Image: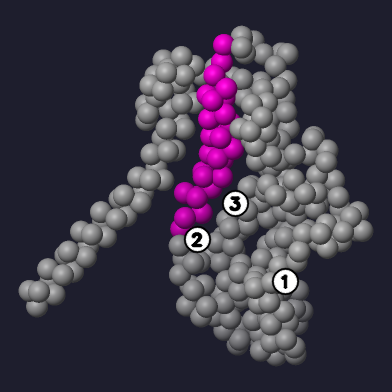
Amino acid sequence: MGREHWSRKLFLICNYIFLTGLSLTMLLPFLNVIAQSFSGSAAIDRGDVMFWPVDFTLNYYRYVFDDASIWRAFGVTVYITVVGTAINLIATSSLAYPLSRGEYVGRKFIMLFVLMTMIFTAPLIPQFILMREINLINTLWALMIPTAISAFNMIVLRSFFMQIPTELIDSARIDGCGELRILWRLMLPLSKPALATVGIFYSVTNWNKYMDALYYLNDRSLYPLQVKLRELLINDDLVDTGNLPFDVASQSVQGVQMAVILVATVPIILLYPFMQRYFIKGMLIGSIKS
């Protein structure tokens, strides 16, 4: 008993040390980004900034918020996240519901096709030709329609639907409800934890849209925030400076880049505290039958 107690205690100590070290490898770079975004250009150039701002300034954020192209990219990203996630949830729940009920003929056959998409993905060239043929090139729909359903998220939602008693659905049918009404008025309200979990997965994916935008968008006015961020990081592209109320030449490019990274990251991070309660519950319940 004593040996088992000490082995468990040793395991917990090692576990805490490992998780603390792992957390620091993720947290410290983020703190450095925050510190640089609030530090003076001279301090950044000298390499004096670690985890606390030196020569505190808000000029980089003034620069970012006065740049019209960044606001435009931010608006595009918000649009993709909101509309795209709504499309994702509608399409995914519409497929997950029939695949979760045993009375639907052919559901195993369709499920096999869904699982195949987790192993095999369409090559880029045929996918690009398809998008061109259906006139989605250079439109924001190209970033939302092809990724409307994720096989993994559909399986999570299907697993949750399968735990809802069949008797409840049969009662709704006896009362005259059709399948769409059962899905909308019964299944979805009872599946809020799973929808929140899947919704946050989709929201993060839509917020970070990058490669699809590079493939399918030629119009710079349609670029999402991540592509704009790439331009700033790779090309040092400090554009649209005509209306700025201060001397742009005196600003640190690295400081501006750090400020843009935070502007692109913080909004999606703020989603987690509000969704955490549903998120944990949805993941635990969805994993039981998966």
Q: Residue furthest left?
A: 2
**Start and end of the magenta stretch?**
250-279
The percent coordinates of residue 188 (x first, y second) are 64, 68
Amino acid on which disc 2 is placed? Tyr
Snapshot quadrant of residue 44: top left
> What residue lies at 68% left-to-right and 47% top-to-bottom?
210
Q: Secondary structure at mark 1?
A: helix
Residue 161 lies, in percent from the top left, at 60, 76
Q: Does the stretch in magenta take in 268?
A: yes
Q: CA distance from mark 2 to mark 3?
A: 16 Å
- The image shows residue 218, relative to residue 186, as above or below, that is above
Residue 278: image x %, image y %? 50, 60
Badge 1 is on which residue? Answer: 94
Q: Describe the element under mark 2 as helix, strand or loop.
A: helix
Which quadrant of the structure image shows residue 268?
top right
> Depth check: 106 or 122 in front?
122
Residue holding disc 2: 278
Mark 3 vs mark 1, CA separation in Å: 21 Å
Magenta-drawn stretch contains 248: no
Residue placed under numbered mark 3 in the picture: 204
The mark lying in front, picked from 2 and 3, is 3
Left/right placement of residue 241 relative to residue 290 reads right
Instruction: Say few, some or many: other residues with alpha carbon within 10 Å of mark 1 (under 14 / 14 to 19 / 20 or more).
Output: some
x, y percent for residue 216: 80, 49
Q: Say if residue 93 shows up in the picture.
A: no
Residue drawn 53% across and 30% down?
258
Work out whether mark 2 precedes mark 1 in sequence or the reverse, and give the earlier one.
1
User: Which residue is at 25% across, 54% downward?
Assistant: 17
